[in-house]
Image (cartoon, grey):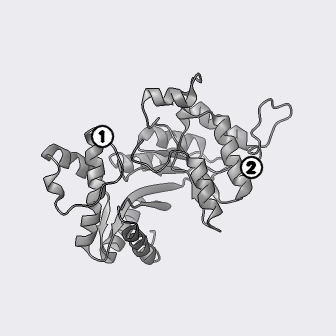
């Protein structure tokens, strides 16, 4: 995956946790079909032991890669998407209190009850999260088609669990904020290019922004990219405040995850500053 900084999720979380004091940190996410549940339990058990009460484990079902890479990751293990529910439950068991005579234990991990999240962009993940009584995060920042159906299915079918008594849903959204709508749209062109490249089968690092995105895509590519990114909130402080309030009103989300893929680091920091500034104005209900 050449378009990301690192696929070593637990290593990055450890680095971030060491450099912060109180913020909660979560994986978004670990693609469980690529890994043995015991290994993930040991990694996140270690993180929870080092940084207690600050670690969440978000799990995805999609392999996120090609068949050869999957084989390289799990080698002779038989894990695939069809075993995902079983793998999730196995992982849960590694975080529960050890049972007498339990032959396999995660050390550390056993008895730490690291909070799990299920991530997804489909009804399948919503249904499974509801059945297992887990929090659910929806990837509307790149696949918004099933958002409202998935949230409804999750809430209507939720079964209380040891981890969670009531459904708890997170919605992820792209927010590109700047001091003017025009500047924000310019910055947003980096993400639009990235999605063009994905559609062309040539993923790579985030490109620098351009003044005229329309010169770079065909009509078909434009339609596909705009559909995938249609829930993105792009603009100045007023636009962002209105967009986030509308999103919260329409989804009734318990949490909102903000994704901001911006080429220039200072512009990205400024975007997050604007989002942080309007956060207190966003009211649920």
Q: Where is residue 181 in the image (x, y as percent from the top left)?
A: 25, 72
Instruction: Please state if 63 lies on the left or on the right of 20 as rendered.
Output: left
| Element type at mark 1 | loop
Which quadrant would residue 109 be assigned to in this image? top right
Q: Position of residue 100 (x, y in %)?
A: 86, 34
**Is residue 264 shown above or below 9?**
below
Residue pointed to by mark 2? 112
Q: Can the viewer see residue 1 in this picture?
A: yes
- Name the residue: 44% across, 56% down: 171
CA gap between label 1 and label 2 equals 41 Å
Q: Residues within 10 Å of mark 2 (few under 14, many from 20)?
A: many
Q: Nearer the viewer, residue 199 or 6?
A: 6
Instruction: Please state if 122 lies on the left or on the right of 71 as rendered.
Output: left
Q: Which of marks 1 and 2 is in front?
A: 1
Which quadrant would residue 208 be assigned to in this image? bottom left
Q: Earlier in the sequence, mark 1 or mark 2?
A: 2
Residue pointed to by mark 1? 202
| Element type at mark 2 | loop
Q: Position of residue 40 (x, y in %)?
A: 64, 40
Q: Can the viewer see residue 82 in this picture?
A: no
Quadrant of the drawing holding the C terminus: bottom left
Q: Residues within 10 Å of mark 1 (few under 14, many from 20)?
A: few
Quadrant of the drawing holding the N terminus: top left
Instruction: Please state if 226 lies on the left or on the right of 109 as rendered.
Output: left
Q: Where is residue 28 in the image (x, y as percent from the top left)?
A: 51, 50
- Name the residue: 61% across, 57% down: 15
């Amino acid at each position: 995956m050449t378009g990301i900084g690192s696929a070593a999720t637990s290593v990055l979380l450890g680095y971030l946790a060491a450099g912060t004091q109180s913020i909660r940190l979560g994986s978004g996410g670990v693609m469980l079909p690529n890994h043995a549940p015991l290994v993930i339990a040991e990694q996140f058990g270690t993180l929870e032991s080092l940084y207690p009460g600050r670690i969440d484990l978000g799990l995805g079902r999609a392999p996120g890669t090609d068949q050869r890479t999957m084989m390289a990751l799990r080698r002779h293990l038989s894990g695939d998407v069809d075993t995902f529910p079983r793998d999730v439950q196995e992982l849960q068991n590694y975080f529960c209190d050890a049972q007498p005579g339990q032959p396999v234990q995660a050390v550390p991990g056993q008895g730490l009850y690291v909070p799990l999240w299920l991530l997804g962009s489909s009804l399948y993940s919503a249904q499974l999260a509801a059945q297992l009584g887990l929090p659910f995060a929806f990837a509307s920042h790149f696949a918004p088609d099933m958002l409202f159906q998935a949230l409804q299915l999750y809430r209507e079918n939720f079964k209380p669990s040891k981890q969670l008594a009531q459904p708890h849903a997170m919605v992820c959204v792209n927010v590109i904020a700047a001091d003017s709508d025009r500047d924000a749209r310019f910055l947003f062109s980096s993400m639009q290019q990235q999605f063009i490249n994905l559609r062309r089968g040539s993923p790579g690092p985030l490109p620098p922004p351009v003044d005229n995105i329309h010169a770079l895509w065909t009509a078909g590519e434009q339609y596909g990219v705009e559909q995938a990114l249609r829930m993105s909130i792009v603009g100045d402080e007023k636009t962002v405040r209105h967009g986030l309030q509308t999103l919260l009103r329409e989804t009734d989300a318990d949490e909102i995850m903000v994704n901001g893929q911006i080429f220039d680091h200072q512009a990205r920091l400024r975007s997050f500053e604007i989002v942080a500034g309007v956060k207190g104005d966003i009211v649920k209900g």
